[in-house]
Image: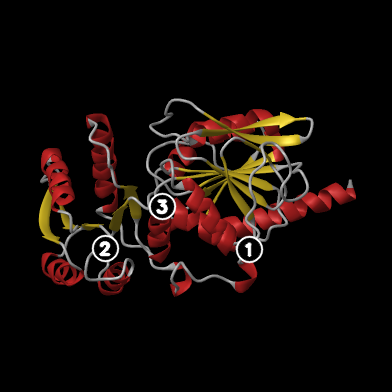
Amino acid sequence: MTFEAVKVFIVEDSDFYRIFLEKILQEDGSFNLCGCASTGMGAIQGIAKAKPDVVILDLQLPDVNRFELLESLLDRFDMPIIVVSSLADESIHALELGASDFLPKVASSYAEDQHKFATLLTIKLKVLAGVHTKKRVNGQTGGESKPTSVRQDQETETPGFSTHGKASSRIIAMGASLGGIEATLKLLQDLEPNLPGMVLVQHMPAGFTKAYAERLNKVTKFHVMEVSRSQLVEDGTVLVACGGRHLQVVKTARGYVAESVTGAQVNGFCPSVDVLFKSVAVAAGAKAVGVILTGIGTDGAVGLKAMHDAGAHTWGQAAASCVVYGMPAAAQKAGAVDEEADLAGIARGLTTYFSDYQNRTKEG
């Protein structure tokens, strides 16, 4: 079997950082560096000529607006783009525009931090090499949203106390990784906030989940917040795991409470979907619903199986709509998935499921 190296093009105006990226690619041995550029025009011309499999893009270039080059590349070429940036808001918006993934720039000179960055970068490049670039949601830029969805009432989290509404008697637990930022956005925009509270783990580094939650709060009808300590799970609310900390759910006299806790990586991630799902299985049992979305690896499969075995109804994202059919595939193989559907199908399924549940409750 002939091995074909992944063709990578680097767009980076810092000589120091470009050399750092080049070294990572060379040491791995699985990549062919087919070109580099330090300006927007150079990137467009070089990529057109080199036809790379994946592009590594720094948004801070001297001759173009931060997102101008990204939008131009997405319009001209059909290939995955990984954004490398130290700014959380910038990275989240890049994903909304159509970038396939991002990595925070490593500023540390510690070998351990650089090794971790290199490992994540090479994994993402290999996974995305055969993936077609996702198109913008509904053909629009991520900065545009439904007027009825825009929220101006961002609130400060108070540990364990209500900030929004009624404590949830049921709970929805969701987990996602690569491609999940776009997937969760689309799923939430297809749902109405008359649903039980949701708890969400999106694989993302510390410092970026707050911007992610704030963005979802602005462009969906849900009240979305990052959980940095503890928070009561309430109807119409989405609680997002803090990067670098696990999220788990416990049952208290006041209702379900989502707690942010320290801990080692599980399945290579912190926060881990398995940690969340396992805690929900124990805390809520058959009163929970589980949803596993696009992502690399197997995180969430064991936890979703625990939820399934405890009586929860479960959904998995269908392969055709995933950026990477890894986590949902592992869950399906484990016998953890009751229903598999694309994002629109999951949204319809959740709406119908809880509508039927409310009707059964009234009849009972």
In the image, 7: left or right of 277?
left
Numbered circle sitting on residue 298: none
| Mark 2 residue type | Met
Residue toward you, 121 or 280: 121
- The answer to whether residue 4 is seen in the rendering is no
Give me the C-alpha separation between circle 2 and circle 1: 36 Å
Give the quadrant of the N terminus. top left
Judge by depth and name the residue closer to the eye, 163 or 191.
163
341 sits left or right of 235 in the view: left
Could you tell me which residue is drawn at 76 percent across and 43 percent down? 167
Residue 79's tag is 2
Label 3: which secondary element = helix
Between tags 2 and 1, which lies in front? Answer: 1
Pair 3/2: label in front: 3
Disc number placed over residue 152 in the picture, else none = 1
Which amino acid type corresponds to the residue marked 3 in the rendered image?
A: Ala
**Residue 271 in the image: x percent, y percent?**
47, 36
The residue under label 3 is: 88
